[in-house]
Image (spheres, rainbow, N blue to C red):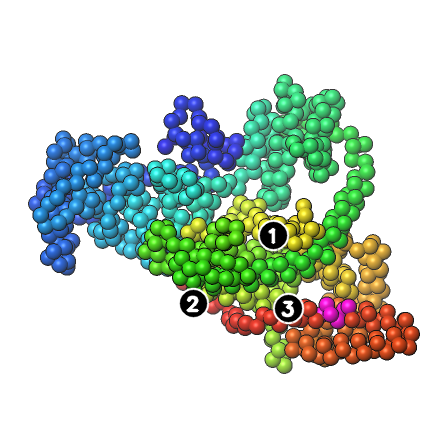
Amino acid sequence: MARSLSATTGRTRRTPLPGSETPAKFVRNAGMVEARAAEPNLPSPLGDLSRASLEELLGVVGEYAREESSANRSKMRNSLKLIVELLSAFPGATWNERWLATGLDEESASKTLTDYAQDRPGGGTLTQGLTFLIAFRAIRPSLAVLRRTVLPNLEQIFFRCQQDPLLDRFCRGIAETGYSGRTGQRAYEDLALVLVSQQIPAADLTPEALLHYAWEWRRVSPNGYENGVYGGKVLWETLCAIAHFSALAPNSVVRAMNGHHRDVGEVVRRQGIGNKAVENLLVAYMQVRVADGMDFSSASSLARRLSGVFWKQIEAINPAQADLRLSAETFQEWLKRTSTKADGTPRRDLDNLVLSVRAFYLDLSAWAMAEPERWGPWAAPNPVPHTLTRGYGARARKRTELVHDRVRMLQPLLSALVDHVDAELASARELLASVKTARPGEEFMCNERLYRRPWTRHDQQHTLWDGDAPLRCHDAETGESINAAIREDEAFWTWAIVHVLRLTGVRVEELTELTHLSIRQYQRPNGELIGLLVIAPSKNDRERVIPMSAELFHVIAEILRRLTASGKPVRVLRRWDDHEKLMSEPLPFLFQRSMNHASGCVGAGVVNRLLKKACRQIEGADHRFLGLHFTAHDFRRLFATDLVNSGVPIHIGAALLGHLSIQTTQGYVAVFEEDVVRHYQQFLANRRRTRPEAEYREPTAEEWDAFEGHFDTRKVELGLCGRPYGSPCNHEHACIRCPVLQVNPEMIKRLEEIEQDLLDRRERAEQEGWKGEIEGIDLTLQLLRQKHADATRFARRTSRVPLGMPAVRSTT
């Protein structure tokens, strides 16, 4: 198959290449793995049968069918005779040459094997005879023939005839993936077809060979290109899981097609710069920056800015520009063009872009002093005037103000989003349960809507292969066809994402990197267990531990219950890091799901897509969501704001968020600046007054007892006080009004009693005219009802799930 390996883009070309007859949709650029068929290395497990006589072939079939019934043995012999008689009518010295002479192996063949079908006493078919010749490695049909011809039991007969222990290992790996029905069966078919079509043993199956097969499978499939299906998805996952593919190989077929190597030079070359000397300079410059310690994510972003946004535009303005000495007119024209994006909106990161260009010129000038022979020819006057960066601080503060305005806008909408994802999950689960119990063609009511469970030929075939019918239904009112299982899956992961983000404030990358091993526990001497969530180092390479509230503990438990519903431990997968272009070690990631016949980790793109979809669903009922949606990072800013507004010292908030500086946390907190300063100054004053000079000495036994006792003093009548260690009660034990009070759901009745008492007091205050008392009671009632709603919502989650602890895997 002709392919273009241009490095300018990673996308599929939409126009045919000159001189290529390959359909445009199949012409694709190189990804992480080059699609390349394996060198033919035809094994002969049963001996060389390429020129065998009919008697010799019948003898091999007889040996194969020794344990079969006499009727089956007769059918197998008759099938082999039928195909031998057909091929004998064509010229050739070997059976494969005769097969090619039939013309059936051509992709555009007008005839198929069924056109030669003939009846024979005693049974037997041409397709079964062809299956035996393929399994004996006597003929080698193309993948196109294998895809359009139904060959009964090809994989079972082929595997048995190969007598290869490695094939047995592959089959056990497929069985252990947990895929069943048609999905699992397709993996066995892929394994047989790739070995047959590329004429190799199992040991020669490489990532390059399997990727070539995946492309060819899609190309020759009658309908494969219409739905984006590729061959070998589950087989690729299996070979990674059993370590047949190296740890450096991508974890999926799609990742192998689309991923890019960890090469900052490739990022520069993909921009398509015309001046190769400047391109080589940018590649060398970026390689030095990476060698100096810049992470790949930041380096690739800088490379795109300098090569794609800066120099590519300079070439468009002045095609004759041969060096870095830019005229003032050229630079001003570039600045004018880049100030706005293609859609006409102002470019937000213009300051960062200009500073990157300025740093590029300054670096070259400085390096030219140390290595004049290498960098000296490129040293040039800096085209960025000093006046251009004037006011950078003011513009940065303006951007911070816009972010704070967004947080203030989203904060009152958070409760609506939480209520929606809770209700959507409950509704999706109820619909899934109703579809499971409904009979084919039956109408049923669910969530006050009328549905009907369809039953088509597709459902029958799916049931035949997988044992269970697709869980689909039709909405009688809208006519919409709904896959209840997919809807429930999306609703669950949306629910889990929203709750974990809002309760932890983690970055989206940290969310997707949570594993079963992230769940830890701390047992106090009195036997009380405290759940901890370990956040792996990400942006600042700083590991941190977040104490889990009861609500967060429930969400994590629900995720574990879902991942271990089959009775097996959490599936161990390898995650692709889109920023660093690296594969992780095999780990039991929490955010993983099975989609399109393969398992994979939830990525940042999926997280933001599910959040945006949830907000779009609320638009009809809540006009505040029109044109507005939550991003994963919005939850982090809301979490930081809520921490400070709740009285948590800002340095503790910085530790929970993983910030190296409290100034960074100040930028996240959408409160008035004077409030931030007041919190920080109060913290400093208290710290200087109470802490000894030697702050980091080992704690004494008395201090440790005081630390342990802190958790006892946090227990109050209505639940648990969430104030941090070493801080007093800032609300004078007015727990109903305190924002850090965590109400125990068992105390809901007590809250109702307090509410009734407050209502009686308010009625008395109205009778007596105590207006100041009424104002205080109203505030208390408002806060009490909010806590009552939170406790009631949490109380509805009655399921208790034993988390267990991950077993220590043997290293041998």
The answer to which of marks 2 and 1 sits earlier in the sequence is: 2
Q: Is residue 100 visible in this depiction of the protein? A: yes
Q: Which residue is mark 2?
A: 567
The residue located at (53%, 35%) in the rendering is 266
Q: Position of residue 497 (x, y in %)?
A: 59, 57
Q: Residues within 10 Å of mark 2 (few under 14, many from 20)?
A: few
Left or right of residue 328: residue 201: left
Q: Residue flagged by tag 2: what amino acid is it? A: Gly
Label count reads: 3
Cα distance, mark 1 to mark 3? 21 Å
Left or right of residue 618: residue 250: left
Q: Which residue is mark 1?
A: 617
Q: Residue flagged by tag 1: what amino acid is it? A: Gln
The quadrant of the image that shows the N terminus is top left
Q: Nearer the viewer, residue 469 or 678?
A: 469
* Marks 2 and 3 in Cβ contact (< 8 Å): no
Classify mark 3: helix, strand or loop. helix
Question: Residue 793: which disc?
Answer: 3
Q: Residue flagged by tag 3: what amino acid is it? A: Arg
Q: Position of residue 675 (x, y in %)?
A: 83, 58
Q: Position of residue 359 (x, y in %)?
A: 70, 35
Classify mark 2: helix, strand or loop. loop
The magenta region covers 782-787
